Image: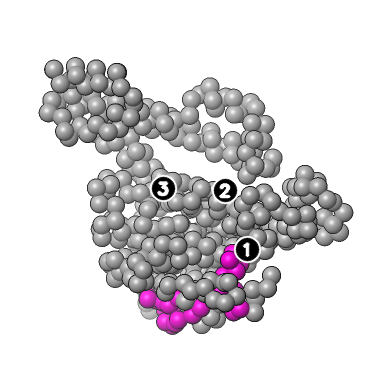
Amino acid sequence: MVELTLLKYIIKAKDEIVLTQLDEEQLLDTQCKSYLKHLKDEKERSNVILAEADLEILTKTPEIFKDIPEITDALVPYYLDQVKERYNKFNFFNSLYDTLQLDSSFEETIDEVQNLLLTTGKQSNTIQDIDCSVLQDNTDDFIMRKPLGFGDFDKINGGLGTSELCLLGGHRGSGKSILALHSALQRYKLGDSVAFISIEMRSNEVSFRLDSMSTGIPIKQVQFDKITDDNLQQFYMRKARTFCRDFDSAEFLKLKSKSDLVALYNSLPKKPNKMFLYDLPSCTLTDIAFIAQKLKKVHNLKYLVVDYLNIIKVPGNDVDPIGWKTMIQRAEGLKSIARENDIALLSPMQTDEEAKVKFAKAIEDPADLSIIFKKAKVNEEGSNKFNLFTSKIRNGTECDFSLFMNKENLTIHADLGGLGC
């Protein structure tokens, strides 16, 4: 009891940082451990649950989103739906957690229940008897490969197929995230609905890269809102060429101000296929499965990028987040998501400086394709040269190939001749 009283005094007298630093395993008294766990759970829930009053304010005053440059008027209803969904979901989990008085953490409870809901929605009987004496109609199951924008690799192997998982290995700073985003943009241009889940980078960082990559305008001009007058019209015309069904270049050339160009771009009808970006700094396999299932049903998702494999959160495995069992669990989970949702899935993964993956064979086992960066080099033209090789490929041909990135606008090409844009 003395220990419990002392704990209450410390928490009340000190900053809340003390709460996160205290470890219940260091405490001797059982009641004291229980009290500290309860306090931590309360704090965790207060950080993820939106207050009902805040929800009401957002719902009744959507103009509040105007302060966020990344959210256009057309996207306000979508973001409101996301906010409501988040509120309802966490409110439900909160009451469930209190009712059941579970021993697991609030975060683990959310993941477990979401996973239960996902699996409950699937068909109960997935085992099929296939009579090989009868001719099968396999038309719907034919693996359609589509290019990733990877130059010679696509020419030799056709790209990445439906239900396949590709792991894209590279050391820190090698360019794997840029190449992954490039592949998503290429699949979008082919007419597929795609999604990019960013765990490490903020959404605006990815958006800046995408804007530079899709328009050819230098990344520094895009990132710091310093697009020159000479490039302003080109920026919005090229965005329209990428994301809009049709447009008249002459209409853009009549306008000078940024506000007028933005208004014109927003008024144009967008392509039926979509490109979604998710900023999820604490992302679990269940989160990824939920997004894939939702987008597959609503937008016929075809291609998903998860950036990146090593930092997907696995509840309960925080003690050894990069251990071999956890890494295999991540890879197997992504492969299951690709198969269950009939989508192509690519995930960068971190290697060492020598282009080696720790526990490589075990991690690559679930993948259909594994492409590894050799160390990038900067050539005389100031462009990054990416040398890559397939360390594993199922139903394809192993190959080495090279790509070049224009460092100014992040565009990727199979040869130096395409770097002039």
Disc 2 versus disc 3: nearer the observer: 2
Assess whether residue 95 is covered by the magenta stretch: no
Q: Which residue is mark 2?
A: 204
10 Å crowding of disc 3: few (<14), some (14-19), many (20+)? some
User: Tag 2: residue type?
Assistant: Asn
Residue annotated with mark 3: 283
Q: Select label 1 or label 3 by which is in front.
A: 1
Name the residue: 69% across, 51% down. Answer: 226
Label 1 – label 3 distance at C-alpha: 29 Å
Q: Evaluate if marks 1 and 3 touch, with contact meaning CB atoms under 8 Å apart.
A: no
For the point 29% across and 71% down, which residue is it?
361
Q: Quadrant of residue 360?
A: bottom left
Q: Residue at x 52, y 55 (%)?
A: 196
Can residue 137 be spotted in the picture?
no
Amino acid of disc 1:
Asn
Left or right side of 113 for 85: right
Q: Range of the magenta residues?
A: 388-416
